[in-house]
Amino acid sequence: MVYYVQLVEELYALEEPWRTRFLVFIAKLATGQQWDDPMPNRSTTETWLAERVWLQKQIAQMLDLWVGHRQ
């Protein structure tokens, strides 16, 4: 499995309200704070993470801190 796909799976598996908070944070980072919509869909989130390795790394670190050491 491609790494960013695993990240997306982990993000969408989070319980609310944390799932929406993480995803809106990602949207703001990916769009230069221009995101003003509800939670982004899975496809959009996956595209952002696929295209931005720096974002993958930052989100992976945040998830590690939030949920503990990930697989």
Image: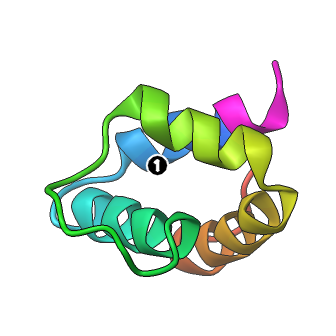
Residue 46 relative to residue 39: left or right: right
Residue displayed at 67% across by 30% down: 5
Q: Which one is nearer the viewer's eye here, 7 or 29?
A: 29
Q: Secondary structure at mark 1?
A: helix
Residue displayed at 42% across by 73% down: 28
Say above or below: 42 vs 22.
above
Say above or below: 56 vs 6.
below
Residue displayed at 25% across by 54% down: 15
Residue displayed at 48% across by 66% down: 26
Give the position of the N terminus as an image quadrant: top right
Say above or below: 63 vs 12.
below
Main structural element of the magenta stretch: helix, strand or loop?
Answer: helix
Magenta part of the chain: 1-5
Q: Which one is nearer the viewer's eye here, 30 or 3?
A: 30
Residue 29 relative to residue 28: left or right: right
Could you say which quadrant of the image residue 63 lies in? Answer: bottom right
Residue 48: x %, y % from top left = 61, 47
Magenta span includes 3: yes
The residue wearing badge 1 is 11
Residue 45: x %, y % from top left = 49, 42
The amino acid beneath tag 1 is Leu
Q: Mark 1 Cα within 10 Å, few/some/many (few <14, many 20+)?
A: many
